[in-house]
Image (spheres, rainbow, N blue to C red):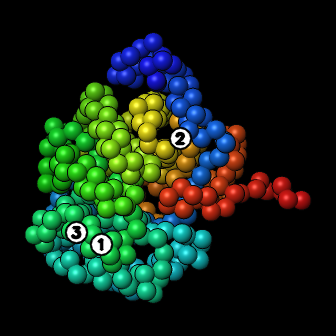
Amino acid sequence: MSQKANPMNDILDFYTNASLIELGAEADRVRKEKHPEGIVTYIVDRNINYTNVCVADCGFCAFYRRPKHAEGWTLSYEQIGAKIDEAKELGAVQILMQGGHNPYIPFEWYLDLLRYIKTYHPIHIHGFSPSEVDFFAKTFRMDARDVIRELMKAGLNSIPGGGGEILVQRVRDLVAKKKAGADRWLEIMEMAHQEGMKTSVTMMYGIGETLAERIEHLERVKEVQARTNGFTAFICWPLQPENTPTMSHMQKTDAVEYLRTVAIARIVLDNVPNLQSSWVTMGMKVGQTALRFGCNDFGSLMIEENVVSAANTTHRTSTDEMERLIRDAGFVAARRRQDYSILQMVEPAGAAA
């Protein structure tokens, strides 16, 4: 909602009180302004979690295991390489690589892993969230900027927005006290941008925050973007409470709440170029509907996904289904790279005949 386009200057008031249709229409207007060509993109990639051992103890995470837990593991380079090869056979152009805060892995292991991938299984590496970078800096007594530089030198191409949750310290103290704080998370993202690296940015909501705190999260992202122009895309999704250590009692938010939230994100973040639909958590039909609530990207084919699945949310799809849903929503489908450049426009089935 630009202030000219809507008489309500208070974005929180608009978010709280506008109808779903109003929010959607304004978000769709912003999307059309930014993406008038009517293309909706998606990427083929694989989510590789290199370890599930973690000492962050986030109350919302059903994936991690504490050190020395019988179910804890760390993948070998060869296992990671095999996953990359499988993904490339399915058309993957990148891997998303994240893991727990594992105190037993030395920094050189990560650098050698990046070099190994670039040498034997070359692919775009989108990896190591700001929370992981902060953990490395603390564990290995390094400056975070030096951590980023070393990772880049070894082969890291871009940083994902994982671990953002709600970038308000009150909320982080409730659900992820041991992880990088709100200021630190944003500081590391800004450092990465200053070093010439592009990143994505996220928001996981429904973890005890107020609507005002969701808006504060968006405004803080917008402020960093105004300085750096380093965020390529924004992605939001609700808490998946099942099987989580301390939040399984919480009510999972519904599709209406998701559409309202993704719409207000598109309206506030008018300087972030792309907004990604989260069909992985919301299902295919809601993910498709989000394309009319501000989203211009359908996310990833997600060849492998472990963290959300650990909370019993297991939506799966194929490239054919993704392309059909994009077309049925009235858009042209296109495969993309991590930087949102178009890899391949996708013709409808039978269009070439």
**Could you give the CA–CA distance between mark 2 and mark 1, rounded to whole angstroms?**
31 Å
From the viewer's perspective, is residue 147 above or below residue 267?
below
Residue where numbered disc 3 is placed: 147
**Could you give the CA–CA distance between mark 3 and mark 1, rounded to whole angstroms?**
6 Å
Residue 163 in sight: no
Asked whether 66 or 33 is in front, the reply is 33
**Residue 245 pos. (x, y %):** 22, 52
Report the amino acid beneath label 3.
Val
**Could you give the CA–CA distance between mark 3 and mark 2, rounded to whole angstroms?**
33 Å
The earlier-in-sequence mark between 2 and 1 is 1
Report the amino acid beneath label 2.
Cys
Would residue 184 appear left or right of 266 to someone viewing this image?
A: left
**Label 1: which secondary element:** helix
**Label 2: which secondary element:** loop
Q: Are marks 3 and 1 in contact (CB under 8 Å)?
A: yes
Q: Which mark is residue 151?
A: 1
Quarter location, residue 51: bottom left
What residue do we see at 54% from left, 22% from top? 21
The earlier-in-sequence mark between 3 and 2 is 3
Asked whether 230 or 126 is in front, the reply is 230
What residue do we see at 59% from left, 52% from top? 41
Give the crowd class for mark 1: few <14, some 14-19, many >=20 residues within 10 Å: many
**Residue 119 pos. (x, y %):** 43, 86
